[in-house]
Every structure is written in structure tokens, then in C-alpha cells.
Image: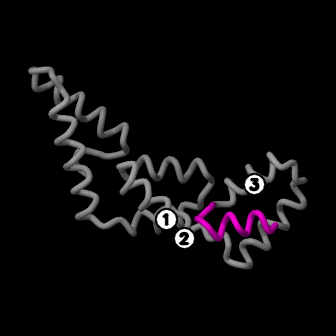
Amino acid sequence: MQRLQALCAKSEHCEYELREKMMRWEIPSEKADKIIEKLRADSFIDDERFARAYTLDKLRYNHWGREKIRFMLRGMRIPSAAIEYGLSEIDEDEYEEIKRKLIDKKEREINDTNPYVRRAKLQRFLYSRGFYIDD
């Protein structure tokens, strides 16, 4: 319990990550459930707080778009309401600036002269990062 509290005090973690750790530590699931309940009660775990922190970190440092962030949060079993809250915290100007920088950089890297091929490559790149052209 103290190890998990210390871990949560240093940075945001979700229930899924903590359960994975407890499985590796071979903690029985009944005990893990009680630990998770206690961590939630003491505000060490908060899905909305985690979703917000994860969203802003992945946008700013990994340059991921909304769709990739949403996909990854779903994979961590974060509730939809918490995911939408986290995504709503994105500043539109910052989002557009990051997207624009990615587009500019990728356009310089594409060597093909055919405009259709260039656009297709750019779209595939943006989709892989979780951005849509019309975002």
C-alpha cells in the first residue's frame, strides 16, 4: 500500500496501471481490490485527473492527436466521461499549432512530386498521430 501511495504521489496513475503492478507483485485480486478502494478514497487515484494529465502530456511531448489519446485511454479502461473531460482540457490554439508544426515538418520530408501521393502520405502520417485533416 505504501509503495503504491508513494508512486501515486509522484505522478498520476490509473487503476489499470496499478492493478498491473500488483499482479506483477503477485498480490491476490481480493487484496488488490481493497487497496484500490483505499487509494480512491484517499484521492490517490482519480480518473478525470489522470485523463487530463495524460492528455496534456501526450499532446505536448509526444504530439499525439485527440483520436490516438482517446484510443490509448480506452485501452487503460478509463471511463468515457473521464476521457471526454481530459480531451476537453486541450487548448485549441495549442492543438492547432502542434498539428501545423507536424504538417510543416512532414511536408519537408516527403520527396514525392506527385501532389496526390504527397497528400496521401501526409494524411496517413496525421492519422497515425491521431489527427484528422479537418480537426
Q: Which residue is mark 3?
A: 19
Q: Nearer the viewer, residue 101 or 90?
A: 101
Q: Which residue is mark 1?
A: 53
Q: CA distance from mark 2 to mark 3?
A: 18 Å
Q: Which contiguous range is marked in magenta?
A: 1-13
Q: CA distance from mark 2 to mark 1?
A: 6 Å
Q: Secondary structure at mark 2?
A: helix
Q: Quadrant of residue 109?
A: top left
What residue type is disc 2 on? Arg
Q: Which residue is mark 2?
A: 49
What residue type is disc 3 on? Arg
The vertical placement of 13 against 128, above or below, is below
Q: Do residues under tags 2 and 1 come within 8 Å of each other at their CB atoms?
A: yes
Q: Residue furthest bottom?
A: 42
What residue is shown at x 39% (from left), y 69% (from top)?
Answer: 89
Q: Is residue 12 magenta?
A: yes
Residue 30 picture location, percent across and down: 90, 59
